[in-house]
Image (spheres, rainbow, N blue to C red):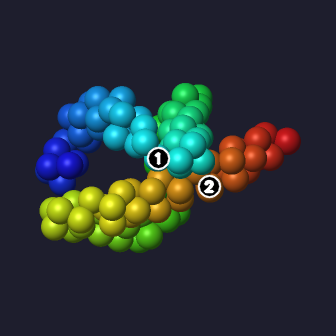
Amino acid sequence: MADYEAGKQKHGDKKFEDAGKRIFDAISECDQDIIDTFTNWNAQLASLHEMKHWNKISDKIYKDHKDEIDADIALEFKWWDSAVYFNSGMYSGRFQKVFLDNAPEYIIGEMLSFI
C-alpha cells in the first residue's frame, strides 16, 4: 500500500497482483458463497483491464467520478495505515465498483457516437 500512497502505481500493482494470488488461501475456510463472490469480483475487474482502450476508458471514468474515487482511496489508505484492513478493503471495493458500474456506460456512449 505504501507504493500506492507514494504514487508508485506500477510497483503497487505488481505487489497486489502477487498478494491477489494468495487471497484464496486466506479465505479457503470461508463459506463457498464468499469464495464465489471474490472469484466473480476478481474476474470482473480483470475483464476491465482486458478491454481495448482500457486506459482511455478508465481515465474518463476517473475524471467523471474524481471526487468520489479520491475520497474512497483516501479512506482506503487511512484504514490501511490504521491497521483496520477490513475497512481498507471496503473502500478499495467502493472505488473499484465505480469503474465496474461505469465502464459499460462509457462503451455504449462511445459506440453511439459513431452512429
At x 36%, y 34%, the residue is 25
- Crowdedness of circle 2 by 10 Å Cα count: few (<14), some, many (20+)? some
From this viewpoint, which residue is outermost toward the right? 115
Residue 78 versus residue 50: which sits nearer the camera? 78
- 91 sits to left or right of 97: left
Percent across and percent down for residue 69 are 41, 63
Q: Position of residue 113 (x, y in %)?
A: 76, 46
Residue at left offset 52%, top offset 34%: 46
Q: Residue at x 53, y 47 (%)?
A: 31
Examine the rendered structure and indicate whether residue 38 appears above or below residue 83: above
Q: Residue at x 57, y 43 (%)?
A: 32
Give the left or right position of residue 95, taking residue 37 as reference: left
Instruction: Tell me the amino acid under the disc marked 1.
Output: Cys
Q: Secondary structure at mark 1?
A: loop
Q: Position of residue 45 (x, y in %)?
A: 52, 40
Relative placement, left or right, of 15 versus 44 is: left
Image mark count: 2
Above or below, comparing residue 71 to residue 50 in the picture: below
Q: Quadrant of residue 51?
A: top right
* Mark 1 neighbour class, 10 Å CA radius: few under 14, some 14 to 19, many 20 or more: few
Three-letter amino acid code at the position of disc 2: Asn
Q: Is the C terminus in the top left, top right, bottom left or bottom right quadrant?
A: top right
Which numbered disc flags the more N-terminal residue, 2 or 1?
Answer: 1
Q: Which residue is mark 1?
A: 30
Q: Quadrant of residue 23?
A: top left
Could you tell me how far apart the alpha carbons at marks 2 and 1 are, in whole angstroms? 30 Å
Residue 74 seen from this side: no
Coordinates of residue 111 in the picture (x, y in percent): 76, 41
Q: Secondary structure at mark 2?
A: helix
Q: Which residue is mark 2?
A: 102
Q: Tell me if residue 36 can be seen.
A: yes
